[in-house]
Amino acid sequence: MPQKIKIFDTTLRDGEQSPGASLNIQEKLIIAKQLVKLNVDIIEAGFPIASPGDFAAVKLIAQKIKGPIICGLARCIPADIDRVWEAIKYAKKNRIHVFIATSQIHLEKKLRRSKEQVIQIAVDGVKRAKKYTADVEFSPEDASRTDLNYMCDVVRAAILAGATTINIPDTVGYAEPQEFASRITYLKEKVPEIDKKGITISVHCHNDLGMAVANSLAAINMGATQIECTVNGIGERAGNASLEECVMNLKVRSDYYKKACTEINTSEIFRTSKMVSDLMGMVVQRNKAIVGRNAFAHEAGIHQHGVISARETYEIMHAEDVGWEGDGLVIGKHSGKHAVESVLQEMGYELTKDQIASITAKIKELADKQKEVERADIIAIANDVTQALTKQEQKIILKELAVMTGTNITPTATVKIEIDGKEIVGASIGVGTVDAAAKAIKSLIDPSLKLTSYSLKAITGGTDALADVAIVVENKKGEKFKASALNEDIVKASVEALIKGANYAMMHKTPKKIRPQDIGE
Ligand code: KIV
Ligand code: ZN
């Protein structure tokens, strides 16, 4: 009987730490619901001490998600651990994940603590977490660069303090498969408490050298029974082990991984990948294993011939095994409100009647122009509608926008806005019209607001594509406000997103749609 490998999904925690990624609370809940369909065993929902937004998201997920264990991350610091518990206590199955760095470089340069002190901090952290829940995971951060015997000492102490899962992170993606596998073997030999107490050995590998999946699977061969991974392999720097790659290796090569299997519903893989990519605004590379657009495209003539005569010639798995649906045509111009509603419901959106009507109208408008509306379009439109500000919330209103550009002419923008009933006009030049318009707006609003992220996506093909602009503005306290806008015109979409972001910052709140009470808490 193969050993079940637990899939610990950290898309909403480590994945959300990816440079350029950020999700609001509703988006996190939508992804968590999809992770339930995927049938992951554990959802690491966030790092509650990091910000009030992280805390609210973990709490909401703990309240709403049934099935997987809901886990929150904490340093071995009392305030962190207490905060995790405050957020996850609502979940029927919950876990506190505590960590502290153990490599010499971290001890000396980051923690400035002796080895003995770190063991004591780890023990105290595990004991504090244990007071709240029986399910406590401990990670010696940077384990793969930690002295082997010291790592074993820390792990033993954490187990004796009550940890039930020991996670071995390759925090900086430094390990090589053979070496990482030997580390797991050594640990199991030197710490007999692991087997005696039935402790789960987990691995958490980063991909700095492109080895995250290989290292995770090598550890599985040596008796690890939990993989920490993320959808599309997103995460800090080069990312984490990709969930879909780990799972499909174990499935497709079950002849090799005889002793291991997962309970992942692989037919949900593609949909989950697409959702994470769309909501995070992080494009999946075309040739990415399992979920890339080219993964099941047999374009070269010789391959096509082989595939037509016998699929197995070039296909080691079938597209339908991972629920591949190409670009996912979902809605046509004759689809009604119910079709839109059920697609959105299936994605996890909880919307009011007015919002559904408005989304349907916009989808029809788009379908009239381009016949097919894809999942990405629907998500962008739904986000645009749900983020709309009420009249009272619109402190800043765009009244006029004019841009001028051409060859041998400096791009210029003039903007008229109304702030609290007073109209003001600003103008600026820029490297392009978007830049000029952004500078013109900046000259009129709170100068301490900084635009820290701007991304533009054409959500449909062609020159008449809808432009989806997502921005993040930051106030002087470092608080971030995310906003997005859709328009056929890139400059208008950019200006609308900027004005929305400035309004959120002025109201000193995150968009209306991300308040828990708006999604039924
Ligand atoms: O990479 C890492 O070491 C981590 C830990 C918090 C597990 O993310
Ligand atoms: Zn990590």
Image (spheres, rainbow, N blue to C red):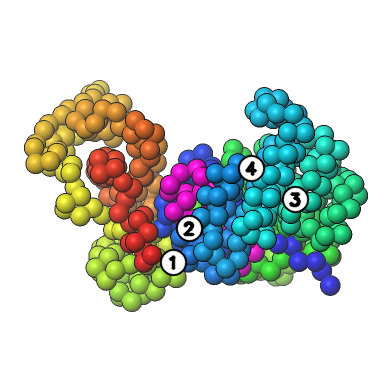
Front position among marks 4 and 2: 4
Which is nearer the eye, 427 or 351?
351
Q: Determine which residue is flagged by label 1.
A: 348
Q: Determine which residue is flagged by label 3.
A: 161
- What secondary structure is found at the residue carrying circle 4? loop
Q: What is the CA distance from the residue labelled 4 to the residue labelled 2?
A: 20 Å
User: Looking at the image, which residue sits at the far right?
Assistant: 189
Q: Determine which residue is flagged by label 4.
A: 76
Return the mark for residue 311.
none
Residue at left 41%, top 70%?
345
Q: Height in image: 355 above or below 338?
A: above
Q: What is the CA distance from the residue labelled 3 to the residue labelled 1?
A: 39 Å
**Highlighted range, magenta:** 37-58
- Residue 39 in the magenta stretch? The answer is yes
Which sits earlier in the primary sequence, circle 3 or circle 2?
2
**Mark 4 neighbour class, 10 Å CA radius: few under 14, some 14 to 19, many 20 or more:** many
- Position of residue 103 measured from the top left corner of the image (x, y, whole percent): 74, 33
Q: Is mark 3 within 8 Å of ligand 1?
A: no
Locate residue 415 relative to residue 316 in the image: left or right: left
- What secondary structure is found at the residue carrying circle 3? helix
The amino acid pointed to by label 1 is Gly
